[in-house]
Image (cartoon, helix red, strand yellow):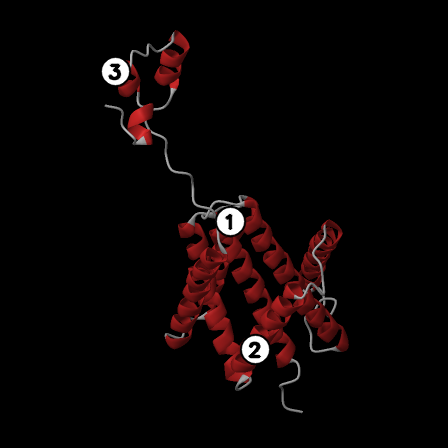
Amino acid sequence: MESKNPVFSRSPYTHQQQGWTPSPEHLQGMYDSPAYAPPAARTMTIDDVVVRGFMTLGTLVVAGAASWYFEVGMGVAAISALIGVVLGLIASFKQSTNPALILGYALFYGVFVGALSRMYESFFNGIVLQAVIGTALAFAAVLTVYSLRIVRVTPKFTKFVIAAAIGALALVLVNLVAGFFVEGGIGLRTDSPLGWIFSAAMILLGTFFLLLDFDDIERGVKAGAPDKYAWQCAFGLTLSLVWIYLEVLRFISYFSGDD
């Protein structure tokens, strides 16, 4: 009696009952085929980036709040910053998707950000809230600009941002070295017109990196990147937001002192 079930009707057992004899090529194909085919890896989604972004940024905020509450000294904060920078460099150059490495960066650097924020707040009352609001507005503005395609991230734009970041880092190092010989160095980090311009430029550069982060996320989702890549995207977003926050904090401080 012939079965109407397509699975049964195609099985070797059914064919054998009907007098079918497998060929040597068919037997070899059955032998070569894997006994178990692992499921395909899940691809990254926007939700993956959002969840891991909240985890990474949340770890940094909680560490910062604890550092503020327990009044961590700037000495301990500096050590935490150094550890955070090392972990961040490793995560950046290796393009790591290791959650422990990325959350470790957020934890240690959060201690530094919290202590530094508390120090600024002790000098300028309300400055931290202003910096947080400024960072949130910058994030919203960049997201809007990117969503509306007002600014398009092209290879040329990416090269410009990377070159600008390298140039800015070189200027900061020169200013640091010059500070050992002249008070204030070359004036990039002083309350002066040059300092204001440089700080504003650094904020702008941070927003450019946010644009690169958004583009990286969009490209990863479209290309079907594995879901673990969401950790690297979350790390990039956190890095850019911390950059913007610290620069906004410094910029506001220039105009918050008593006359």
Spatial distance from mark 1 to mark 2, Cα to Cα? 26 Å
CA gap, disc 1 and disc 3: 61 Å
Where is mark 3, residue-wise?
A: 17
Residue 67 drawn at (x, y percent): 41, 71
Is label 3 in contact with label 2 (beta carbons under 8 Å)?
A: no
Q: What's the residue at 53%, 85% (across, down)?
A: 126
**For the N terminus, which image quadrant?**
top left
Is 25 drawn above or below residue 252 in the view shown? above
Q: Nearer the viewer, mark 3 or mark 2?
A: 3
* Residue at 73 percent of width and 51 percent of height: 159
> Is 135 left or right of 180, judged from the image as shown?
left
- In this view, the residue in front, 145 or 75, is 145
Of 202 and 212, nearer the camera is: 212
Q: Find the residue positioned furthest to the front.
A: 1
Mark 3: amino acid: Gln
Q: Amino acid at mark 2?
A: Ala
Give the left or right position of residue 22, taking residue 197 as reference. Answer: left
State the residue lying farthest toward the left.
1
Marked residue nearer the N-terminal end (1 or 3)? 3
The residue at which mark 2 appears reads as 131
Name the secondary structure under disc 1.
helix
